[in-house]
Amino acid sequence: MPRKVGGRPVLPIGLSERDADTVNRSSAGRIVKKFLNDRNAYVDEMLDGLCEAYADLYVRLGEDGRVIARRACPIRDKVGIATGGGSGHLPVFLGYVGRGLLDACAVGNIFAGPRAADCIAAMHAANGGAGVLQLYGNYGGDRMNFEMARESAEAEGIEVSTVRVCDDIASSPRGSRGLRRGVGGMVYAFKVAGAKAEQRASLADVTSIAERVAASCRTIGVGLTPCIVPEVGKATFEIEDDEIEFGMGIHGEPGIWRGHLKTADEIVTEMLDRLFADLDPMRGDRLSVLVNSLGATPLEELYIIYRKVAHVLREKGITAVMPLIGRFATSMEMAGASITILPLDSELEALLRAPSFTPFWSIQ
């Protein structure tokens, strides 16, 4: 229960007395504190703030305002790219709506897929007459609703293609890649496909380049602490202070093993060993590397991670190209990190370097 002063409960910042039931203690006895008004309005109030902050870039659409689109959309004769997914992962998904990236995003609740109606609305917003690519992570609810949206759009005469990103190597063996979750690799797919669409490439060509990225990128993550889903008000899982979950998913899905926390170099070495065993890069290859915070891990620690990544790549004769280090695909305030690698050829590298802009990621 909240502590009391003068007989009245003192609630954590952002909670009114009517929301006192959101005040919980985790397994470690810590009080959960968030900046909230109404826990059930968390996503909608976040979208309100986002569109207030970037009113010149974004427009909010859909029956319940759960679609974010570029204000410039639809862009005539350009392939539209629509995505969607649960909230709680910023910048994924809606943070990549912008020039040279995505055109529209359907937004779900925290860790929950968007509604089919919002997927349809996102596709309509993205459609400039050259077809629409659905590009999203491999999760059951997202698949079901985007498939329904595709059927609806095609019935209206819109040409549609679909690419699902399945890059999390911890979620399924190498021989069943189609069952893997989509995590940090979605960032590369958004960037490369978005750059190709900006060139006014055909839907077939934009789809092909997205498929190449989806087939070749690989990710693995580690978790140190849980996060709090506002609607639930308690930790998504329990983990001891001296433990690490190796291979954890972006929603807190169980990993490959759980054990005592190791040094950063030991953790990174195992992450790279598993990524390389799955991808088989060779001496002379060029890779882009994304070192991603799951939310609470600071940049300082991400650079400690990348320090080891750079050393290992150099020893193997592999060139790191345009390393990306920061918060790209998070899990609320979870402490942890993921590493994504993408083999590059000249075309992929050029598309990765192409200009793009969102408030969350800009390349000039």
Image (cartoon, grey):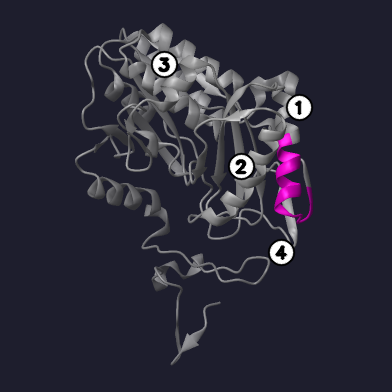
Q: Residues within 10 Å of mark 2 (few under 14, many from 20)?
A: many
3D distance between C-alphas at marks 2 and 3: 31 Å
**Point 72% across, 34% down: residue:** 315
List the residue tagged with mark 1.
277
User: Do the residues bearing badges 2 and 1 touch, measured as CB atoms within 8 Å?
Assistant: no
Foreground mark, 2 or 4, reads 2
Q: Mark 2 or mark 3: name the one nearer the start of the chain.
A: 3
Tag in front: 4 or 1: 1
Secondary element under disc 3, as helix, strand or loop, is: helix
- Distance between the alpha carbons at the discs numbered 4 and 3: 45 Å
Extreme residue toward the bottom, this view: 6
Please provide the residue range marked out in magenta: 258-272
Q: CA distance from mark 1 to mark 3?
A: 36 Å
Mark 4 against mark 3, which lies toward the viewer?
4
Q: Position of residue 268 (x, y in %)?
A: 70, 44
Q: Does the residue at mark 4 contact the one at mark 3 (Cβ under 8 Å)? A: no
- Amino acid marked by disc 2: Ser
The percent position of residue 210, horizontal first and vertical second, equals 48, 18
Distance CA(mark 4)–CA(mark 1) = 30 Å
Q: Is residue 259 magenta?
A: yes
The residue pinned by badge 4 equals 241
* Image point (52%, 83%), residue name: 3
Which circle marks residue 184 in the picture? none
Residue at numbered disc 2 = 338
Marked residue nearer the N-terminal end (4 or 3): 3
Q: 241 left or right of 305?
A: right
The three-letter code of the residue at mark 3 reads: Arg
Residue annotated with mark 3: 150
